[in-house]
Amino acid sequence: MNASSAALAAISGLGFGLSLIVAIGAQNAFVLRQGIRREHVLPVVAVCIASDVILMTLGVAGFGAIVDSAPMIMTIAKYAGAAFLLGYAFLAAKRAFSASGLAAGGGAPIALGAAIATCLAVTWLNPHTDLDTVVLLGSFANTYATPDRWFLTAGAIAGSLIWFISLGFGARLLAPVFAEPKAWKVLDSVIALVMTALAVGLLAS
């Protein structure tokens, strides 16, 4: 095994992994919201990272080809994901347009179990995101020899680690901005629009 090729594979994996993760979506919006509220941040971040580890490992191990050959799985996941995204959009819109407005903390706190369940839902009920991670990373990894592809996977996982820790724990720096209820209304309005757009795009695909 060549140390330089392994290092290059890891760096490539880091960049590729970040390109898959860093985007406006349900998962990142939820992590951002929890980070600003400073509520169950560590468990939420841990769920996101663990999910990426599973998806990325499956992709490199060749599971993407299996999923790609079973369209019924994707059809079921598509409608389930769209239903969840629309429901999440409705709740965000309801918070944004509530006559009483939101508290400075962004609304009533949610239980740890509810936070983890929501995080799992926004992570796993988005088949296009999951398929991108599994299939695209798997395809990219297949261009590398067997030892190096796992260094590439490690790099991609490191990207997930860096991103979600930065997003979850760095979001608290925005807390002064969100001390006003109006800021939460704007954030929830944006989340509602993004979730609706994702659901429509999912159904139209």
Image (cartoon, rainbow, N blue to C red):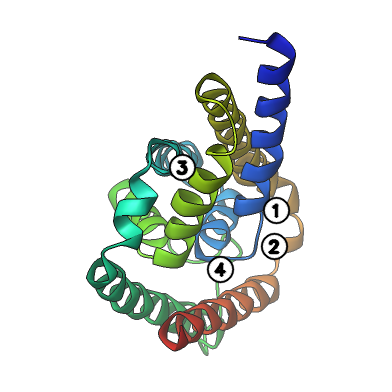
Marks 1,2: beta carbons within 8 A: yes
What's under tag 4, amino acid-wise? Ala
Measure how far apart labels 4 and 1 are at the Cα level. 13 Å
For mark 1, what is the residue?
Answer: 175
Q: Indicate whether 196 appears above or below 5.
A: below
Element at label 4? loop
User: How far is mark 2 from mark 4, CA to CA?
Assistant: 10 Å
Would residue 181 be found to the left or right of residue 62 on screen? Answer: right
What residue lies at 74% left-to-right and 14% top-to-bottom?
A: 4
The answer to whether 94 appears left or right of 118 in the picture is right
Q: Which mark is residue 197?
A: none
Mark 2: secondary structure: helix
Badge 2 or badge 4: first in the primary sequence: 4
| Disc 1 versus disc 3: nearer the observer | 3
Residue 93 x %, y %: 50, 84
Where disc 3 sits, the SS reads helix
Q: Disc 2 residue type?
A: Phe
Q: Is tag 3's residue or tag 4's residue first in the polypeptide sequence?
A: 3
Which of pointers 4 and 1 lies earlier in the amino acid sequence?
Answer: 4
Residue 156 in view of the camera = yes
Give the foreground label among 3 and 4. 3
- Residue 8 position, x and y percent, is 73, 25
Q: How far apart are marks 3 and 4 (CA)?
A: 33 Å
